[in-house]
Amino acid sequence: MFPFRLGTTSYIVPADLVANARFLSGKVQDVQLVLFDIDDGPSNLPSPETTRQLAEIAASNNLTFTVHLPLDVRLGDNGETDHVSMLKAKKVIDCTRELEPFAYVTHLDGRAVKGGATPAQLAHWQDRSLKALDILAGWASGAEKLAVENLDSYPPGFFLPVIERAPVSRCVDVGHLWLDGHDPLPHLQAALPRTRVIHIHGLAPDGRDHASLAHMPPEKLDPVIELLVRENYSSVLTLEVFGDEDFLSSVAAIENSGKRIHHEGTKTRSREA
């Protein structure tokens, strides 16, 4: 029914990465590995054995992996390339390289300038962000593997001056745009030619995001799905939710959206005939 590869996160059942991949096999075509590595704390970075098992599951089930880098990336205050966000990113890329990820979802850290900055300060941050992406691209075996994501609480076009100067891909987070009160369609339409991953998630009645798409009314959800179908978007659409209830109800919401779009298209063609 859909041209895109449906995906979701590695936190759907309360178990490890391998158990989630096994549970999701046959239900989705991509699993976003949400990884963390806290100093003197917990880490879920895959061991070589875990990576081997994940690769076997992928090979047997037409499954790909996207990998979410753990921290918003930046260079150090004096331009150091060994900032903790870069070191953590390299660690994640190194331990998942065998999986040949379809994309590494990447956040840029713009907190120092998003609240207001002089043109010179903004240009300085953009130059450093470009350098950080260039380093990451070398580790990831290609800039196109880096899917730079729009973030909530930032203006929708905040990262564009950096993205337009780098040969990276895009990750359009529709849920973030909904959360901040933006119509996602113009942003998605403009970004689609370079988009490798799309994140979508609903807004709960209490305002929480990363909730089930069942919370989104058809007039919000259907135009997004219709655009992806019309443009024959064939990359990954990730249901960025956590938990089996939100996952299953989100899958149902996508399927129901597709049925409504097909029904409306059939009615339109009948009238035109």
Image: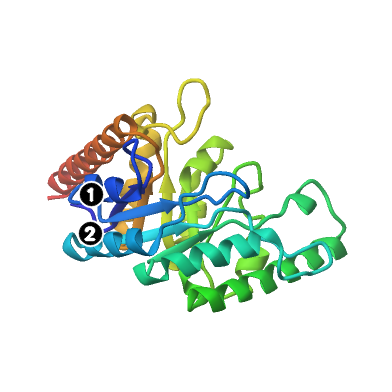
**Earlier sequence position, callout 2 versus callout 1:** 1
Residue 262 image offset from top left, x and y in percent: 19, 45
Say if residue 227 shows up in the picture: yes
Question: Please, what is the three-letter code of the amino acid marked with disc 1?
Answer: Arg
Say if residue 232 shows up in the picture: no
Residue 46 image offset from top left, x and y in percent: 41, 57
- 121, above or below 245, in the image: below
Q: Residue at x 41, y 53 (%)?
A: 33
The answer for how far apart the CA atoms under marks 2 and 1 are is 7 Å
Q: Is residue 131 left or right of residue 103?
A: right
Q: Quadrant of residue 160?
A: bottom right
Circle 2 packing at 10 Å, graded few (<14), some (14-19), many (20+), is some
Q: Which mark is residue 22?
A: 1
| Front in this rendered view, residue 107 or 224 | 107
Q: Secondary structure at mark 2?
A: helix
Residue 26 image offset from top left, x and y in percent: 17, 50
Say which residue label 2 marks: 57
Q: Secondary structure at mark 1?
A: helix
Circle 1 packing at 10 Å, graded few (<14), some (14-19), many (20+), is some
- 84, above or below 206, in the image: below
Q: Residue at x 77, y 69 (%)?
A: 80
Residue 245 image offset from top left, x and y in percent: 30, 29
Question: Please, what is the three-letter code of the amino acid marked with disc 2?
Answer: Ile
| Front in this rendered view, residue 147 or 36 | 36
Q: Residue furthest top?
A: 206
Q: Residue at x 27, y 40 (%)?
A: 254
Q: Mark 1 and mark 2 in contact (Cβ < 8 Å)?
A: yes
